[in-house]
Amino acid sequence: MNLPDYLTKIEPELAKVIAAFAEAVKQIDQVIRTAETTSAGSFNTSGDEQLKLDILSDRIVFAELEKSGVVSVAASEEQSEEKVLTKGGPFSAAFDPLDGSSLVDVNLAVGTIFGIWPGAGFIGKSGKEMLAAGYAIYGPRTTFTVAVDTNPVEFTLQQDGTFKMTIEKLEIGEGKMFAPGNLRACHENKEYLSLLDFWAENGYQLRYSGGMVPDIHQILVKGKGVFSYPGSESCPPKLRLLYECAPLSFVIEKAGGASSDLTQSVLEKKVEELDQRSVVCVGSKDEVDRFEKFLTV
Ligand code: AFP
């Protein structure tokens, strides 16, 4: 089955937004293979240095969402404000056009992340109100993973530009694999250090690339494991609720896994600011429980 066939089973207007993201992924796949990995000489609202690739990918996604004709408001990690695209459009879309872009020059896998909400705007909404979410990975292959009502599905970009279904049902069980982000926080966050000791002492397999999307995709494909990114006073959590944590938590929970911001599912957390950061832990239910038990003192 290919992506257009899969999209015939989805509400047609919503399918247009997912198709727009898939089209953007095809174009980003082209530019990322050959484009310069140099700085654009500018910084995004989070103070991250923007690469020319970040800005190029951002423009590509906005253009495809506008063409879809059904997105009223779109917000990107690379922009300080949301943009009105099609007045009265039934959806809003938030995205990180190129997550992990600082890994492109070292040739590690990076991704695009997206979440689709009903209505206009994001403030005051929570992740559980999303209608669909997903991500692409630009690695040895380019894949596109999307979740709507049921388990996430993976498609792989073919040479002819089509997306062929390669995993029909992504599902998460239990197992010993960990991707521990922000270890710098351990010198202050002793609870995180104790959890790290637990993982090490109990034979957990370390799988951390520094790219949230490939790290989380590994958990989904292997059907087990945990990704964490808590913080401490001098190393606060840096991952964005709207563009990273909520969409990826939606995909993980649709696959039967869990998510946590330390006190609740990430999908319960209301968006107060576009650039809001959150503690995040996602993966196998027992591992997310363990994260909460170790880190809530
Ligand atoms: P960049 O987009 O700046 O490369 O950051 C990648 C990321 O947002 C996420 O993909 C990683 O899990 C996390 O940051 C890595 O953070 P550290 O640089 O703190 O390890």
Image (spheres, rainbow, N blue to C red):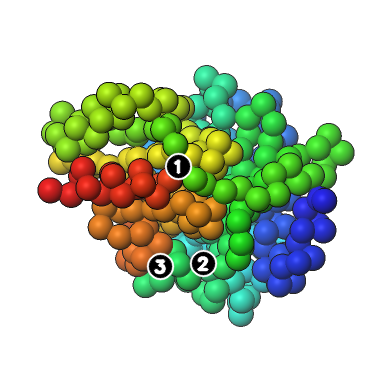
Mark 1 vs ligand 1: CB under 8 Å?
no
Q: Which mark is residue 69?
A: none
Label 1 – label 3 distance at C-alpha: 27 Å
- Amino acid of disc 2: Met
Q: Is residue 118 left or right of residue 242?
A: right
Measure the C-alpha gap from mark 1 to mark 2.
26 Å
Kindly indicate the quadrant of the structure image that contains residue 234.
top left
- Tell me which amino acid carries mark 1: Glu
Amino acid under disc 3: Ser
Residue ID for mark 3: 126
Question: Which residue is pictured at 34% across the width and 53% down the height?
Answer: 260
Task: Kindly identify which residue carries mark 1.
Answer: 174
Check mark 2 vs ligand 1: CB closer than 8 Å? yes or no.
no
Tell which residue pokes out farthest to the top in this image.
106
Residue 273 appears in view: no
**Which residue shows up at 69% across the image and 44% down it?**
167
User: Of residues 137 and 227, which is closer to you in this image?
Assistant: 227
Which mark lies nearer to you, 1 or 2? 1
Q: Looking at the image, do the residues carrying marks 1 and 2 touch, with CB atoms under 8 Å apart?
A: no
Binning the other alpha carbons within 10 Å of mark 3 as few (below 14), some (14 to 19) or many (20 upward) gives: some
Q: Indicate which disc residue 130 carries.
A: 2
Q: Horizontally, is 248 left or right of 85 in the view?
A: left
User: Alpha carbon of mark 3 to alpha carbon of mark 2: how far?
Assistant: 8 Å
Which image quarter: residue 222?
A: top right
Q: Is mark 3 within 8 Å of ligand 1?
A: no
Question: What residue do we see at 72% from left, 68% from top?
Answer: 10
Which element is circle 2 on? Answer: loop
Whole-percent x, y for residue 14 in the image: 67, 68
Q: Is residue 190 above or below residue 46?
A: above
Mark 1 or mark 3, which has the lower sequence index? 3
